[in-house]
Image (spheres, rainbow, N blue to C red):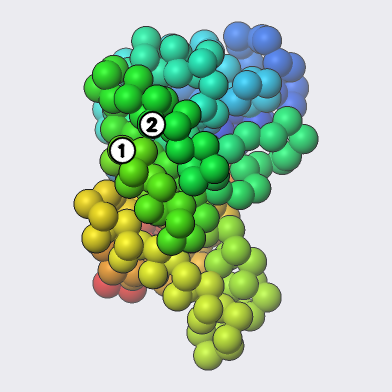
Amino acid sequence: MPLLSVNIDHVATVRQARYRQGKDYGEPDPVRAVHEAELGGADGITVHLREDRRHITDRDVELLRPLVRVKFNLEMAATDEMIEIARRIRPHSAMLVPEGRNEVTTEGGLNVAGQATRMREVVKRLKEAGCLVSAFIDADAAQVDAAQGAGFDVCEVHTGPYAEAFLACGGDLRLARLAGEVEKVRRAGERIVAAGMRFNAGHALNYANVGIVARLPGVSELHVGHAIVSRAVFVGLREAVREMKRAMHASW
């Protein structure tokens, strides 16, 4: 049964809609969101400290690290600035993701294979700080193998293409497009586990589509953010997290 790490970036997105970047006040405060998410059953808390600080800020990360009582996962680009922040903050896990200034959200997996030397260096520096190190990758065998070679502990498989197929097919696994995307994630997960790494999954997962991914063999942890924060507008964050865990576990 996979664990649930709740990404609270979009709590900060709502705050920044009113209180612009650089402000260290305003509501809703993602620091307060952690308590509600944990009471709802979150097994981990994820935040993405972007280079442009468009939602989560340095202040948030500084305050969150000692307050989070479950696993604290810091998403970050593989830049020297972010590496030094992670080495100082020491999150339980550091997840390397690609980052584009013009993207609304992360649009694809990290190209580990295309920058193997740099990735080995970054992984080494983060492990020296005591972090588990994760790569957010597409469901591609070459990227899994490159992640193993670079020394990553965890691979999180990008489930965006699966989520798009689920929506297009109405969740009908008899349709080739959806079945094919599920198979890609499944095969990537098996390769990750066989390589001795943890198999996580995330991106665009929601209450309707999460069950299929939660049932995949060997999946350790799911990362969900936008769907939970969206639901929280209507039922509160604590209940939204509970509902997501029910959706994940209903298939077991």
Mark 1–mark 2 CB contact (< 8 Å): yes
The C terminus: image quadrant: bottom left
Residue 104 got which mark?
A: none
The residue wearing badge 2 is 120
SS for callout 2: helix
Is 205 positioned to the left or the right of 108 in the image?
left
Residue type marked 2: Arg
Q: In the image, what residue occupies the spot 51% across and 81% down?
A: 179
Residue type marked 1: Gly
Along the viewing direction, whichever of 79 and 116 lies nearer the viewer: 116
Is residue 132 among what the camera can see? Answer: yes
Q: How many numbered tags mark residues here?
A: 2
Q: Position of residue 103 (x, y in %)?
A: 73, 39
Q: What is the crowding at mark 2: few (fewer than 14 residues within 10 Å), some, or many (at least 20)?
A: some
Q: Position of residue 51 (x, y in %)?
A: 63, 21
Residue that extends furthest to the bottom in the rendered view of this protein? 174
Task: Identify whether 116 is placed above or below 83.
Answer: below
The residue wearing badge 1 is 151
